[in-house]
Image (cartoon, coloured by chain):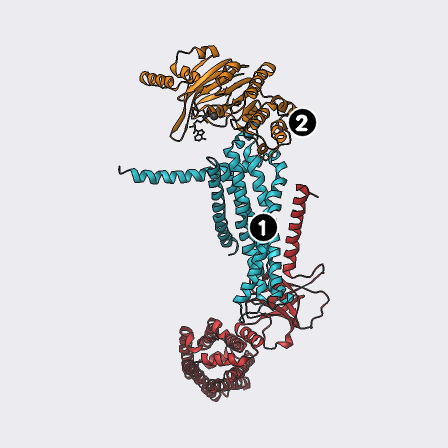
Chain colours: A orange, B red, C cyan
């Protein structure tokens, strides 16, 4: 039960964002996807959930070809998938509890009581105890982000797609969220793809790290592999050295 | 207290539906909860009457027009009305359709036929169906005018204006022609009586009848002439009515003459056929002129009826068996009559081509 | 400049126009298909009937009250002397029921309801809430669009019925207080040319206006692009387009139903 991205191409009008992304996330594995802002990480993630359709290539999740799934099958698959949006995307007309209940209501055999318990449990996990009856507008950015995370994990999906779950959080909360991601994997055997800009987190939580650059995955490997990468682009990115990236880009440009 | 959405929406929807239903019903102006009686009347035409128009009796609104439908073969219109229950109508009750006001709203009025002797009511075709009549345009305008302004003076002035010099001349010429015809007819009859006086009492009696009829026709012509010269519209109308009555009598007399003859007349002759055709032509012409003639009101409708009777009379004579036909085979008589017919024809053709010459458009407003 | 340039731009203009129409009809078709998903929109219907319907009644009543007053005064002004005053009742009733009730309410509510829907769905679109619905296996059309359109279709006739009633009442009160008329005269005029079809016609109009306003609002909201500015554009478009469509539909109904 894995996530496979096979040669995804995607353009918005003349802007070619993805130009052949291929990546596999094996069952029970946590893979981090890193890359420059605007590289197309969020776009990649949306392809996995079927929110965007690739121009070319395909996505296979759970053995199912996502772009060609019927709506019904897609919805069945989506209930196996938790999606943490980069900007939380909480329903702002609902309280936090109602936000979390939305996914739970779609599950069969959950009583109102079960739902309430599950909401409480999920909020506890992201350290938002007692926020049930608040509206998203009454939360800080970081709290909203965690509420969004709670909403994604509430219905215990097999796959979790995190779009920058820790950006904008203080170091302590970041650690809490990192631990949560790891626990989801250990306790529930979740298969996760995490988009992050925080290399520290990436090293900690990931089995493997993939780097998206110029519309392709340019390198995949364990945290150790990435740290020891021979590619100037990857090294420059992880070490935060723009000059090195530029150099690497020029070399690639010459070799290409 | 804060109402739940369900309650609020429920109240609103129910209230809205009630408002729609109650308001819609109230606007029709029907009385609440009362069981109503149905009456049906038959008409030749209903003007601009529509469903929902008022039904009045002695000036009081008693109901509404419910349904208007064409009779099965299109030879009439049935109008169903619902009225207050328990009303007693006169035995010769009929329904008169007329404009309620100047502005196009019509009404159906339950009347006694004796109140409106000048109106032509339909015959009720079956029990429970009242006879009906529709006010023609001029009387409609008159009625409205008298109702609204209460002064027909203005109106008749305007009518007078409509009779131009030319119109008067045309009508006079027409009448002169008619006079000539009747003169010729008279001459012809005189000659006939003279020549064939020996044939028998029956024939003589019939010829006397015809003679009398032509006399009447002549009288009519004089009446009409007088009318035109008179100039005053009211007088014109009353003279015209007198004239048409005479004409009517004339045709009845002709009719009587015809019915007196049957035993004698064996076969239709071409000459008489021509008379018949002429009469038919006149009839048709009158119909063609219908719209204009109607402006002169029921008077002319009566004239039209007279023409139809004349037509029938001619047809009867024509059907008659043999003897008169043979009598008429006389060449002198033939020539005379033929000349009369030709004159009539010419006049007819002219009338048909330029009806406007004879009956100017009566513009009231 | 190459000679094909003008043709190119004409061609692409036509194509994009058809493309936009195609997207719109696709959206409308999707809305119809999503009707089947009763489980998703059913529980939300009452909420939207409240928000679109019940909450719109005050503005509709306000509007029609003043319309009724003005109609009565203008009618009497127009009819001076020549025409019996009871025609004020006819004019107020007919105009209110046939035209101003549905159309003015429609135009006002294209602002209130259409703009509201477009802004709300537009915000949901740009803040990815619609995507979030998708990821939680909700059909967003069934969840967001269908209950709004249905609520508008169901509630607009009710709103207009109230509006018509109040407008006529206002006209009546004006007539007996300001004009030299009696209640009997007003009612006589009101009932004079009334046909039961008048109300049907009014309701047909109201229903179609409700449908158009909600559909356009949802469509614009759903296809919002960009951020706050995009929401603004979508809202403006929703109001302008549904306002225009109301007038076009108004003429359409007059041509098809009144002839
Ligand atoms: N719906 C869209 N329409 C047009 N362009 C889009 C759309 N979504 C994304 N893009 C463009 O695609 C590119 C990649 O966007 P994406 O959100 O995937 O970036 P990202 O890698 O997630 O960046 P960040 O780290 O800042 O979130 C951007 O240039 C963006 O403008
Ligand atoms: Mg992103």
Q: Residues within 10 Å of mark 2 (few under 14, many from 20)?
A: some
Q: Nearer the viewer, residue A234 or C220?
A: A234
Which residue is situated farthest in the right direction here? B86
Q: Chain of mark 2?
A: A
Identified at 46% across, 38% down, the residue is C229
* Residue linked to disc 1: C59
Q: Nearer the viewer, residue B209 or A139?
A: A139
For label 1, being within 8 Å of ligand 1 is answered no
What is the spatial separation of the Cα atoms under label 2 and label 1, in whole angstroms? Answer: 40 Å
Percent x, y of residue A112: 68, 28
Q: Nearer the viewer, residue B254 or C101?
A: C101
Figure check: B275 above or below B108:
below
For label 2, being within 8 Å of ligand 2 is answered no
Badge 1 marks a residue whose secondary structure is helix
* Residue linked to disc 2: A116
Q: Chain of mark 1?
A: C
Percent x, y of residue C234: 48, 40
Q: Quadrant of the N terminus of chain C?
A: top left
- Left/right placement of residue B62 relative to residue B187 reads right
State whether residue B71 appears in this view.
no
Figure check: B119 above or below C32:
below
Percent x, y of residue A109: 66, 25
Figure check: A80 above or below B206:
above
State whether residue B54 appears in this view.
yes
Q: Quadrant of residue B181?
A: bottom left
Badge 2 marks a residue whose secondary structure is helix
Percent x, y of residue B152: 54, 80
Mark 2 in CB contact with mark 1 (< 8 angstroms): no
């Amino acid at each position: 039960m894995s996530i496979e991205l096979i040669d995804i191409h995607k353009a918005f009008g003349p802007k070619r964002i993805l130009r052949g992304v291929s990546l596999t996330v094996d069952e029970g594995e946590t893979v981090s996807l890193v890359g420059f802002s605007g590289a197309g990480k969020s776009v990649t993630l949306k392809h996995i959930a079927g929110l965007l359709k690739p121009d070319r290539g395909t996505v296979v999740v759970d053995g199912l070809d996502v772009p060609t799934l019927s709506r019904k099958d897609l919805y069945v698959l989506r209930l196996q998938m938790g999606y943490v949006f980069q900007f939380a995307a909480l329903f702002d007309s609902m309280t936090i509890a109602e936000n979390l209940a939305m996914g739970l209501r779609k599950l069969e055999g959950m009583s109102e009581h079960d739902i309430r318990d599950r909401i409480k449990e999920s909020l506890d996990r992201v350290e938002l105890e007692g926020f049930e009856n608040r509206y998203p507008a009454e939360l800080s950015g970081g709290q909203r982000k965690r509420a969004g995370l709670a909403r994604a994990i509430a219905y215990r999906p097999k796959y979790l797609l995190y779009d920058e779950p820790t950006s904008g959080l203080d170091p302590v909360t970041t650690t809490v969220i990192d631990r949560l991601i790891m626990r989801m994997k250990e306790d529930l055997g979740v298969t996760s793809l995490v988009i992050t800009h925080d290399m520290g987190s990436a090293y900690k939580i990931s089995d493997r790290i993939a780097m998206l650059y110029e519309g392709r995955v340019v390198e995949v490997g364990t945290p150790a592999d990435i740290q020891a990468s021979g590619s100037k682009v990857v090294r420059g990115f992880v070490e935060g050295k723009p000059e090195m990236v530029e150099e690497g880009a020029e070399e690639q440009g010459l070799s290409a | 207290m804060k109402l739940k959405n369900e309650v609020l929406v429920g109240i609103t929807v129910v209230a809205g539906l009630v408002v729609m239903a109650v308001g819609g019903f109230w606007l029709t102006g029907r009385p609440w909860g009362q069981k109503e009686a149905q009456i049906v009347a038959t008409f030749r035409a209903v003007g601009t009457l529509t469903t929902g128009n008022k039904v009045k009796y002695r000036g009081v609104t008693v109901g509404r027009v419910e349904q208007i439908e064409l009779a099965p073969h299109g030879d009439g219109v049935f109008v169903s009305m619902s009225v207050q229950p328990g009303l007693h109508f006169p035995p010769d009750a009929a329904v008169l359709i007329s404009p309620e006001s100047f502005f196009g709203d019509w009404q159906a009025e339950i009347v006694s036929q004796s109140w409106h002797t000048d109106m032509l009511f339909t015959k009720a075709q079956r029990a429970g169906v009242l006879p009906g009549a529709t006010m023609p345009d001029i009387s409609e305008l008159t009625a409205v005018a008298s109702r609204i302004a209460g002064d027909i003076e203005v109106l008749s002035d305007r009518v007078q204006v409509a009779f131009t010099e030319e119109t008067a001349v045309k009508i006079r010429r027409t009448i002169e022609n008619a006079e000539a015809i009747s003169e010729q007819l008279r001459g012809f009859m005189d000659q006939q009586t003279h020549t064939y006086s020996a044939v028998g009492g029956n024939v003589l009696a019939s010829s006397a009848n015809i003679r009398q009829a032509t006399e009447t026709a002549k009288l009519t012509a004089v009446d009409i002439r007088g009318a035109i010269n008179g100039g005053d519209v009211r007088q014109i109308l009353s003279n015209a009515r007198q004239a048409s009555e005479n004409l009517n009598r004339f045709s009845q007399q002709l009719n009587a003459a015809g019915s007196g003859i049957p035993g004698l007349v064996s076969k239709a002759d071409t000459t008489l056929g021509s008379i018949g055709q002429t009469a038919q032509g006149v009839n048709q012409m009158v119909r063609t002129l219908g719209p204009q003639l109607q402006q002169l009101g029921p008077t002319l409708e009566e004239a039209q009826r007279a023409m139809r009777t004349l037509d029938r009379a001619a047809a009867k004579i024509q059907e008659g068996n043999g003897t008169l036909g043979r009598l008429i085979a006389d060449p002198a008589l033939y020539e005379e009559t033929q000349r009369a017919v030709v004159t009539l024809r010419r006049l007819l053709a002219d009338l048909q081509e330029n009806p406007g010459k004879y009956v100017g458009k009566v513009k009231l407003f | 400049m190459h000679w094909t340039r003008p043709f190119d731009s004409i061609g692409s203009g036509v194509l994009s126009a058809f493309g936009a129409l195609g997207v719109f009809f696709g959206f409308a078709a999707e809305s119809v298909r999503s009707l089947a998903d009763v489980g998703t929109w059913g529980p939300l219907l009452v909420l939207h009937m409240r928000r679109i319907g019940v909450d719109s009644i005050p503005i509709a009543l306000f509007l029609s009250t003043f319309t009724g007053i003005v109609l009565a005064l203008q009618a009497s002004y127009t009819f001076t002397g020549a025409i019996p005053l009871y025609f004020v009742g006819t004019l107020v009733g007919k105009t209110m029921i046939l035209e101003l009730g549905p159309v003015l309410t429609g135009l006002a509510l294209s602002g209130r309801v259409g703009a509201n829907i477009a802004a709300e769905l537009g915000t949901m679109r740009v803040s990815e809430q619609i995507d979030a619905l998708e990821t939680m296996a909700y059909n967003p059309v069934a969840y967001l669009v269908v209950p709004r359109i249905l609520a508008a279709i169901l509630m607009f006739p009710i709103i207009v019925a109230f509006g018509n009633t109040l407008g006529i009442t206002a006209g009546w009160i004006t007539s007996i207080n300001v004009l030299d008329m009696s209640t009997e005269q007003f009612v006589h005029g009101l009932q004079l040319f009334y046909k039961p079809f008048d109300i049907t016609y009014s309701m047909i109009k109201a229903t179609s206006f409700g449908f158009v306003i909600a559909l356009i609002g949802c469509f614009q909201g759903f296809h919002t692009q960009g951020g706050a500015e995009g929401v603004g554009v979508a809202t403006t478009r929703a109001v302008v387009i549904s306002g225009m469509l109301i007038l076009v539909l108004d003429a359409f109904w007059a041509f098809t139903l009144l002839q």
